[in-house]
Amino acid sequence: MNPQAKLIFALSLTLGTTPTISSNHWIMAWTGLEINTLAILPLISKSHHPRAIEAATKYFLVQAAASTLVLFSSMTNAWHTGQWDITQLSHPTSCLILTVALAMKLGLVPFHFWFPEVLQGSSLIVGLLLSTLMKFPPITLLYLTSPSLKPSVLMTMAILSTALGGWMGLNQTQTRKILAFSSISHLGWMAIIIAYSPKLALLNFYLYTLMTAAVFLSLNSIKALKLSTLMTTWTKAPSLNAILLLTLLSLAGLPPLTGFLPKWLIIQELTKQEVALAATIIALLSLLGLFFYLRLAYCATITLPPHTTNHMKQWYNNKPTNTMVAVLTTMSLMLLPISPIILAVV
């Protein structure tokens, strides 16, 4: 793909996200979602591999269905109330349809099946865009409409997402699929809290984006698509692998790393709202995610030679670490001590 085409698609992604997150009218928000979908499709299918074409087709069908439901929900609400304002969603049927549509857009259980397959058919950089930037507009719509949505429906979807994201990630050997199930699990944490504290859900999304970007860019630097490849990368970039270990533990939510902050605040808020049972369940289910993060970390750093993989050792890479990776990994590890400042800003 030539640079001009890449620039056009990158600009379209930016211009598609902007109207959705800044508009009050449903039609403008829907238009932004459509521009986003059409801009990412060529990036998914640019390798012309059958798996990439399949991923692009699945992504298009799911996103088209979800966008249709968003439009149908807003039209139903406008028909009954005369309001096209996003924050004025009040009709019960519209609220339910919108919950389903945004769950499809985000990949929440039970509408999650497309996400691991699409991520597996994409490159790591496109996978990063799908896991972070492409989830920003639907999360914004969820944030704006959260007072109208049913907390019980969101809580059920959240607990199922955290459970299935953890269970289905356990036996995966492909790093992209593991990160897809990790994303589904993290979305569960955002969905459970958005009805009670929308700002906390956004904070969780920002920190998740930060840590996921660090992991994706680190894996892209060492070209690790499978766990068996990850086992042999210690000789190629030892310092990057050591940092990757800590970033994965941060993504798992272990203290004293950045990833612990949103989980701590969400459990605290759920307890304040007297849903301690849900807080206990989701905290226990996060242990499933911890297992496969530890598995990734083990493959990346603790399997030193001699070991039983049949891959050749990779040459030591003397190139300096990408500045973006360095900045993102540092932030993924060290933001917990300044949490009072973050909370004051949020």
Image (cartoon, grey):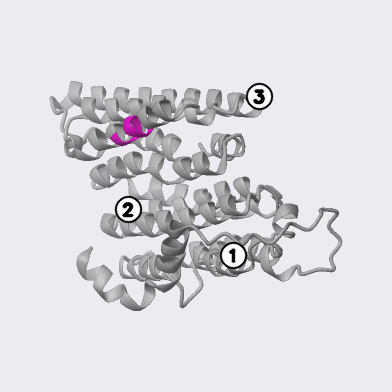
Q: Secondary structure at mark 3?
A: helix
Q: Nearer the viewer, residue 267 or 299?
A: 299
Mark 2 or 3: the one toward you:
3
Q: Quadrant of residue 11?
A: top left
Q: Quadrant of residue 196?
A: bottom left
Q: Residues within 10 Å of mark 2 (few under 14, many from 20)?
A: many
The C terminus: image quadrant: bottom left
- Residue 87: image tag: none
Residue 151: image location, x then y, percent: 34, 50
Q: Secondary structure at mark 1?
A: helix
Q: Earlier in the sequence, mark 2 or mark 3?
A: 3
Give the distance between the C-alpha atoms of the residues marked 2 and 3, in whole angstroms.
Answer: 38 Å
Above-or-below relation of 225 to 315? above
Residue flagged by tag 2: what amino acid is it? Ile
Q: Nearer the viewer, residue 229 or 183?
A: 229
Residue 235: image location, x then y, percent: 71, 64
In this rendering, would 75 be left or right of 156? left
User: For mark 1, what is the residue?
Assistant: 290
User: For mark 3, what is the residue?
Assistant: 50
